[in-house]
């Protein structure tokens, strides 16, 4: 018989970290990696709307890194030997991709509103969920040692999604929605 997906061990509002210790399901650590998981799910949704190609492949590589971040955050802080490493070079890769896309874009002279096309809107959802994940991890970092490379990566990732939204609007020949104050 196959293993069941439900264990019933979380029925009283507690869950296990990688390494064995149990914490409340509303613990900051759970909030942090849960938000990263939400971000990863939205990224999969965006990827499902794209044709096969370089952009989709790059987004799937980001999904793997987000899974790594989730794994790191889900690891019991009392068991650092179990933690994966997260490389500072990952943020550098995002910066290079942002610079590459921005070369094709007109300079930004107005604030733009999310929208205009479902793919552009998804990029903006990803931007805002990235920011929320970053905020959750900043809160956690006040209580627990968090690899600074993760925070830097998430900060760049929200910038990446903003630029990706603009770049996708250009690729799809969609007019950006300018904010008129």
Image (tube, rainbow, N blue to C red):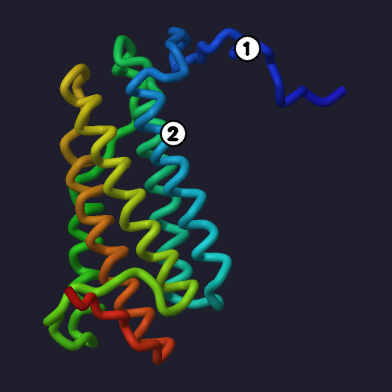
Q: How far across and how far down the image is residue 11, in percent?
A: 62, 12
Residue found at x 47% / y 18%: 25
Residue found at x 25% / y 52%: 90
Q: Which image quadrant: the N terminus?
A: top right
Mark 1 is surrounded, within 10 Å at the Cα level, by few (under 14), some (14 to 19) or many (20 or more) other residues, namely: few
Residue 116 drawn above or below residue 155: below
Q: Are marks 1 and 2 in contact (CB under 8 Å)?
A: no
Q: Which image quadrant: the C terminus?
A: bottom left
Which residue was labeled with disc 2? 34
Residue found at x 19% / y 26%: 141
Residue found at x 38% / y 47%: 65
Foreground: 30 or 52? 30
Q: How far across and how far down the image is residue 50, in percent?
A: 53, 74
Residue 170 drawn above or below residue 13: below
Q: How far across and how far down the image is residue 21, in percent?
A: 44, 8
Residue 8 drawn above or below residue 133: above
Q: Quadrant of residue 113?
A: bottom left
Q: Which element type, helix, strand or loop, lies under badge 1?
A: loop
Q: How far across and how far down the image is residue 10, in percent?
A: 59, 13
Residue pushed farthest bottom?
A: 173
Mark 2 is surrounded, within 10 Å at the Cα level, by few (under 14), some (14 to 19) or many (20 or more) other residues, namely: some
Q: Is 130 displayed left or right of 54 in the figure?
A: left
Q: Quadrant of residue 110?
A: bottom left
Which residue was labeled with disc 1? 11
Q: Which element type, helix, strand or loop, lies under badge 2?
A: helix
Residue pushed farthest front?
A: 181
* Nearer-N-terminus badge (1/2): 1
């Amino acid at each position: 018989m196959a293993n069941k997906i439900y264990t019933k061990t979380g029925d009283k509002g507690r869950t296990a970290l990688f390494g064995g210790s149990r914490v409340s399901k509303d613990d900051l650590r759970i909030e942090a990696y849960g938000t990263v998981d939400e971000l990863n799910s939205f990224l999969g949704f965006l990827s499902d709307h794209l044709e096969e190609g370089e952009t989709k492949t790059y987004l799937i590589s980001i999904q793997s890194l987000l899974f790594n971040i989730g794994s790191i955050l889900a690891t019991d802080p009392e068991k650092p030997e179990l933690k994966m490493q997260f490389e500072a070079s990952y943020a550098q890769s995002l910066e290079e991709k942002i610079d590459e896309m921005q070369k094709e874009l007109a300079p930004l002279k107005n604030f733009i509103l999310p929208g205009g096309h479902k793919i552009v809107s998804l990029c903006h959802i990803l931007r805002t969920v990235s920011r929320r994940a970053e905020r959750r991890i900043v809160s956690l970092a006040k209580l627990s040692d968090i690899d600074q490379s993760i925070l830097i990566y998430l900060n760049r990732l929200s910038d990446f999604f903003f630029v990706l939204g603009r770049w996708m609007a250009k690729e799809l020949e969609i007019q950006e929605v300018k904010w008129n104050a």
